[in-house]
């Protein structure tokens, strides 16, 4: 289970909110769960109290910060946290108008089986609460930045029958997405400007008719669309009509990356990216 948020603000303006969300995540999964971090030398290092001080400083770095935390469990039972912080108004990003700050929280499926999908949804909403996001999403996903090459090479070819499973390059997405939306997912978080442009939650309620789909206002500028009580991977006997409906409704605001690792030839990714539209 991958929970991602895209924040159209410099890292200095969102660092405190991201720290609050990270603490909520640790409260849910256990503070000792994330026990390795990616250090300045490019190596994975065992976490201790001094490591957490380094992580906190990196999150609050005013320019560019990158934080990757993981657990030592084997994939796919691994917990992960990833933060891509950027001074998006700084000169280094003047040629990247789509750059945002991004954060991702990973829960293994075992956690959802133990606690239930409703608890996952509650946690996703709690993580979203402090964040000034323009968009976000939560659902089934291919993850694993410790073994990303092997995982992508092995798993991506098996994705085609399961369109409800997401695959994402977070760094690339955070450089390009801007105010657009990555859709569809089990939970799709929509903030301004997209929510304002489409006419707010009432527009979504008027357009989304598949049984089980709900639209919830979080505040005046943020909402979440939930596609049924559980995330679904899809398959020959599971056509995912709610996902297809949401993709079509939100297409005017959708972000479509040009590439993603693991897909070959590249045309295969373009087909995958439009799997709910064509």
Image: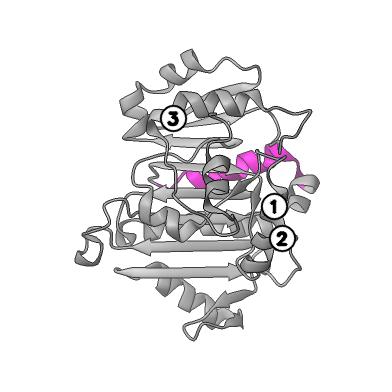
How many dots with numbers?
3
Please state the horizontal and vertical placement of residue 260, each as a whole percent of the image: 52, 55
> Sequence-wise, which precedes: disc 3 or disc 1?
1
Please state the horizontal and vertical placement of residue 117, each as a whole percent of the image: 71, 39
CB atoms at circles 1 and 2 under 8 Å apart? Answer: yes
Label 2: which secondary element = helix
- The verdict on residue 126 being magenta is yes
> Sequence-wise, which precedes: disc 2 or disc 3?
2
Determine the CA span between mark 3 and mark 1: 25 Å
- For disc 1, the marked residue is 157
Decide which of 195, 171 is in the foreground and name it.
171
| Magenta-colored span | 115-131
Main secondary structure of the magenta stretch: helix
Q: In which quarter of the image is residue 239?
A: top right
Badge 3 density bin: few <14, some 14–19, many ≥20, Cα 10 Å: some
- For disc 3, the marked residue is 251
Left or right? Give the position of 74 relative to 42. Answer: right
Residue at image x 61%, y 60%? 26
CB atoms at circles 3 and 1 under 8 Å apart? Answer: no
User: In the image, which disc is placed on residue 24?
Assistant: none
Please state the horizontal and vertical placement of residue 232, each as a whole percent of the image: 71, 36
């Amino acid at each position: 289970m991958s929970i991602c948020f895209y924040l159209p603000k410099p890292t200095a303006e969102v660092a405190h909110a991201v720290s609050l969300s990270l603490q909520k995540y640790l409260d849910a999964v256990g503070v000792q769960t994330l026990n390795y971090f990616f250090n300045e030398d490019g190596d994975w290092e065992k976490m201790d109290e001094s490591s957490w001080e380094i992580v906190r400083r990196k999150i609050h770095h005013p320019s560019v910060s990158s934080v990757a935390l993981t657990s030592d469990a084997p994939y796919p039972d691994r917990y992960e946290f990833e933060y891509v912080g950027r001074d998006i108004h700084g000169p280094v990003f003047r040629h990247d108008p789509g750059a945002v700050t991004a954060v991702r929280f990973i829960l293994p499926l075992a956690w959802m089986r133990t606690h239930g999908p409703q608890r996952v949804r509650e946690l996703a909403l709690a993580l979203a609460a402090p964040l000034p996001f323009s968009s976000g999403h939560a659902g089934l996903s291919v993850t694993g930045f410790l073994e990303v090459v092997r995982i992508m090479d092995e798993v991506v070819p098996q994705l085609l029958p399961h369109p409800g499973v997401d695959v994402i390059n977070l760094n690339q997405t955070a450089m390009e997405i801007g105010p657009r939306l990555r859709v569809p997912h089990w939970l799709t978080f929509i903030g301004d400007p997209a929510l304002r442009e489409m006419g707010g939650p009432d527009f979504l309620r008027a357009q989304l008719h598949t049984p089980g789909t709900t639209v919830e206002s979080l505040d005046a500028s943020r909402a979440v669309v939930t596609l049924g009580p559980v995330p679904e991977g899809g398959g020959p006997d599971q056509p995912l009509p709610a996902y297809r409906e949401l993709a079509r409704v939100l297409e005017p605001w959708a972000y479509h990356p040009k590439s993603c690792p693991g897909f070959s030839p590249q045309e295969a990714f373009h087909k995958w990216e439009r799997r709910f539209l064509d």
